[in-house]
Image (tube, rainbow, N blue to C red):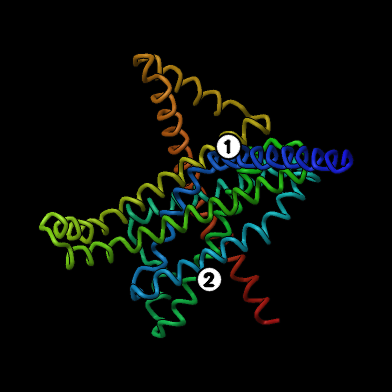
Amino acid sequence: MSGLLALLDDVAAIAKVAAASVDDVAAAAGKAGAKTAGVIIDDAAVTPKYVQGFAPARELPIIWRITRGSLFNKLILLLPVAMLLANFAPWLITPLLMLGGSYLCFEGGEKIFHALFPHADARVEADMSVKDPGHLEEQKIKGAIKTDFILSAEIMTIALAAIEAPNVWMQAATLAVVAVGVTLAVYGSVGIIVKMDDVGLYVAQNARTGIGRGLGRGLVKGMPHLMKLLSVIGTAAMLWVGGSIIVHGLDTLGWPWLYHSIHDISVAVGLLVSQDWTAVVEWVATATMDGLFGLAWGLVLIPLATRLVGPVLQAVRGKDKAV
């Protein structure tokens, strides 16, 4: 009997340790996930465009396929690479973060440049040339998953840099929780966003009160404006996150001037308001300057990407197809 009680006591102790580990993973995942907020906003803002133009019945199936592709990107492709980097080549994390940040700056800068100086978009023209809806859907899904891979790599790298875990297993578990949580949050939000106009239409046609029908019509009319707002927020988040990554990366690599200059200016601006608003004003000032730097860096990268990197990649792909 005493042996059984000892065994039960050991089981209870193991259960307590396991529960504490789960709590630690959840806490670490929450902290690491918060660091990726800017990229998450951008991901949620970018994705709805991939279902625009399709029948309402195809919207959720398309989003679900993109969600599965995103989970595959994070858990199967990126998680093992992230763990190898963290444990065998941690010095590569900052340069890779900066590379991803540069991509975000380029994407944001290109969007603003296109808005200021409209020009033909080869991707849009290619979509217009596709007449088969099924083929177009496959192209859109593949394009969304490719874009998700870049953003997922950035999310995983940012989260990895923020994780403080005692061992590799805790680190891997925390990163997996972040991957699943972020993916469900992003694409769950996207699913709600793209179906809100259908919900509004249903309410407008079936509500029993005038207020309810008015609310439904408001949803239908408001969704296009919300989509435009999300696009603006996504671009701003892209530039803010990308610029912030580059600024912090330069500081980490031994070029701290820009980081400290932005910090000092933000503190000086914060002193101009009451103490109740100091932290908020400092954050806004820092985010604004990071975003402006991200925009400047993105505009610099546009000719480099379009005239050098793009043609080289096309040439390599052409050779691969020829082989």
Q: Residue at x 62, y 61 (%)?
A: 73
Of 170 and 244, nearer the camera is 170
Where, by quadrant of the figure, is residue 31 drawn?
top right
Q: Residue at x 71, y 48 (%)?
A: 172
- Type of the residue with mark 1: Lys
Name above or below for residue 277 compared with residue 138. above
Q: In the rendered view of the protein, which quadrant contains the C terminus?
A: bottom right
Label 2 environment density (alpha carbons within 10 Å; few <14, some 14–19, many ≥20) = some
Where, by quadrant of the figure, is residue 44 drawn?
bottom left
Which label number is shown at residue 31?
Answer: 1
Label 1 environment density (alpha carbons within 10 Å; few <14, some 14–19, many ≥20) = some
Q: Position of residue 253 (x, y in %)?
A: 68, 33
Of 212 and 12, nearer the camera is 12
Name above or below for residue 232 compared with residue 64. above
User: For mark 2, what is the residue?
Assistant: 142
Q: Secondary structure at mark 1?
A: helix
How much space separates mark 1 and mark 2, taking CA atoms? Answer: 31 Å
